[in-house]
Amino acid sequence: MFTITRRQIHQFRVIARKALSFQRGVGPPIVVQPTDDGLLLRIQSDEAAVELRLPDERQGDRMCIPFEFLDECQGKNDTPVVLTVEDGKAVARWQDGSVPRESRYDQPGASVQFPAMPAELTENSPGLLQALADTCDITTPEATRYALTCVQLNGDRGSVAASDGHQILVQKGFDFPWEGTVLLPAHKLFSCSQLPVDERIGIGRNEDWLTMRVGPWTFHFALNVEGRFPRVEECIPRESSARTTLEIADGDAAFLSDNIRHLPTPDDHNRPITLDLNGEVVIRARGEDSPAVTELALVNSTRSGDQIRLATNRAFLARAVTLGFRQVHFVAPDQPAFCRDSDRAYVWALIGPDGAIAPTGNPQRIESPRCAPRQAAHTAKPTRSRIPPMSATNTNGNGRTSTATAVAHEADDSSPIDQAEALRDSLKDTLDKTRDLIRTLKRQKKQSRIVESTLASLRQLQTTGL
């Protein structure tokens, strides 16, 4: 007889689905295996295997349960589920509120041998989990002559790297117990909220499998042993090659993250924006077949070096900010942009200068909230902390901003009435700009729907031979 809580079953179900890369339908069976120091729950496919170790003093016989057991018995509470074997069937009993529940399952056979543990697991910091999540986001599902569906783990450099052919992310500072490189297919598991984020991570490998241990969880992943990976380190520019550097203030980073995805776009594939670093830091965008230009002005950010105007995919600039970088370096409008710190490098290809939007006479302009002078952009090492939504520049203890505090700092020497009036004017200005942006975005959305409807009609006409 074994006892598992409904919460543990829920966690196992969520993590198993992500690790084995299936979201719907019936999964493989679960093996419940007693050991001398606890209870093992195991599930596996040809590409991955999951093991959860639970303390359990009671011993019993090994049993095999179909995946539907997880769907039926999961829950968000610690109600115990008792598992027994009766007449050759696996039996689960639990309380659903005040109602007793019981389910009986035929025991399927587990035909595949569970991967063996490697001879050595090397401990790494919890940051390895975040590094794997970040690099998996960079991979592409499309197969090419290079294995860009995979993350490269380099034992000689202690680095994790990924690329989709348009961007590269390399993070180092880790310790892997092998020589050379291995290719790990990308997994959504590493960003799963059910995994512990403060546990040290043990990692090792056998010939064809990579093994990771995180708290009570052990994962085995089938490696891509035949793929090739590009020499991404050779594609990272030296910081000394930069001719222009954009210094993004913390408040502007949050403003950019909140608003850049809402800007109009003429191309859903590249989603281009113009970054103009000529006197001020401005991001421009324009919708398809529309003369109207929308500008985001990062009033607290600065440029050093040469003036430059270029076009880039907005997702890449937003990713650099989300990763915590506050300095972006440029060599030329037709050369890759890059960010670096002591342990990480992020590089992406620019669209180039040809598609850049020049200043117009009457743009729809939205400015970021102004920082007090002592809160302007700084050159401190960027962090990977998540950027909270912000509508001003000062932050309080919970990471949210305070417009009132920012205005008060600018008016320390004024009377209370002056400060109140300044606050009122600032809030009114922000409200007006927000309304203007909403109107612009609604207009662009309406135009986009008209275009989509027209294209759909043309496709229908083509299929009828007209």
Image: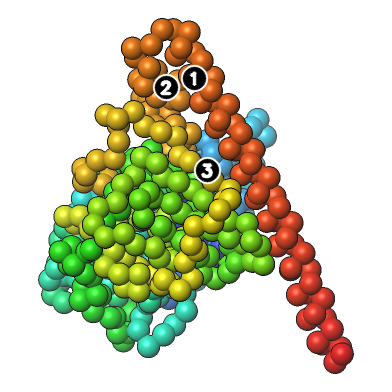
Please provide percent x and percent y for residue 458.
80, 80
- Residue at x-position 38% and y-position 38%: 251
Please provide percent x and percent y for residue 201.
24, 53
Name the image quarter holding residue 329: bottom left
For the residues bearing labels 2 and 3, Cβ distance under 8 angstroms:
no
Residue topped by disc 1: 423
Mark 1 is surrounded, within 10 Å at the Cα level, by few (under 14), some (14 to 19) or many (20 or more) other residues, namely some
Name the image quarter holding residue 139: bottom left
Identify the element where label 2 is drawn. helix
- Residue at x-position 34% and y-position 28%: 372
* Label number found at residue 407: 2
Please provide percent x and percent y for residue 309.
39, 63
- Residue at x-position 46% and y-position 54%: 283
Question: 230 or 81: which is nearer to us?
Answer: 230
Question: 195 or 334: which is nearer to us?
Answer: 334
Residue 383 vs residue 114: left or right?
A: left
Residue topped by disc 3: 366
Identify the element where label 3 is drawn. strand
Farthest residue toward the front? Answer: 361
